[in-house]
């Protein structure tokens, strides 16, 4: 595949996912628009999920320290995920 013929932004995606996956993406999304979340929001979701999984009912302080946030913020995350503290 001639990389310079796919467009500048698509060329970056091609480099990241490889030619086979790029062609598959073109079959599915070709000609349309696809929303990609920001890196920050993706990382935040992963972090929050980890906090929820690791919470044992007694370790708010430890989680807050490990993730460099306040206990209040840990509680807010737990509440957002429907976990009772």
Image (spheres, rainbow, N blue to C red):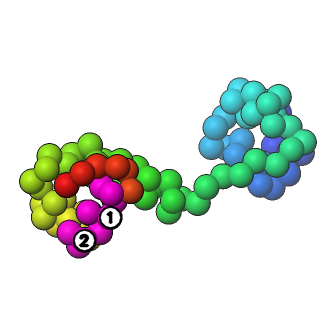
Identify the residue at image location x=13%, y=50%: 57
Which residue is disc 1 drawn over?
Answer: 76
Task: Report x, y in % for residue 42.
Answer: 50, 54
The numbered dot on residue 31 is: none
Task: Report x, y in % for residue 79.
Answer: 33, 57
Confirm whether the magenta stretch covers residue 72: yes
* Mark 2 Cα-neighbour bin, 10 Å: few <14, some 14–19, many ≥20: few
Task: Name the secondary structure under disc 1.
Answer: helix
Considering the image in quadrants, where does the C terminus appear? bottom left
Nearer-the-camera pick, 64 or 24: 64
Tell whether 35 sits left or right of 31.
Answer: left
Nearer-the-camera pick, 20 or 81: 81
Q: Mark 2 and 1 residues: CB-CB less than 8 Å, in contact?
A: yes
Identify the residue at image location x=86%, y=37%: 30
Total of numbered circles in the picture? 2
Nearer-the-camera pick, 46 or 7: 46
Q: Is residue 69 visible?
A: yes
Identify the residue at image location x=9%, y=54%: 58
Which residue is disc 2 drawn over?
Answer: 72
Task: Name the secondary structure under disc 2.
Answer: helix
Task: Report the residue that reaches farthest toward the left.
Answer: 58
Residue 66 figure quarter: bottom left
Identify the residue at image location x=34%, y=49%: 82
Vertical order, 25 against 44 (above or below): above
Q: CA distance from mark 2 to mark 1?
A: 6 Å
Confirm whether the magenta stretch covers residue 4: no
Vertical order, 43 against 34 (above or below): below
Which region shows up in magenta? 70-79
Q: Is residue 19 visible?
A: no
Please name the predominant secondary structure of the magenta segment in the image: helix
Nearer-the-camera pick, 46 or 6: 46
Task: Report x, y in % for residue 5.
Answer: 89, 45
């Amino acid at each position: 595949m001639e990389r310079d013929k796919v467009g500048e932004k698509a060329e970056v995606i091609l480099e990241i996912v490889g030619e086979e996956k790029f062609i598959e993406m073109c079959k599915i999304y070709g000609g349309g628009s696809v929303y990609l979340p920001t890196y920050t929001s993706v990382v935040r979701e992963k972090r929050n999920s980890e906090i929820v999984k690791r919470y044992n009912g007694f370790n708010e302080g430890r989680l807050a320290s490990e993730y460099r946030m306040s206990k209040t913020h840990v509680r807010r995350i737990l509440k957002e995920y429907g976990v009772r503290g």
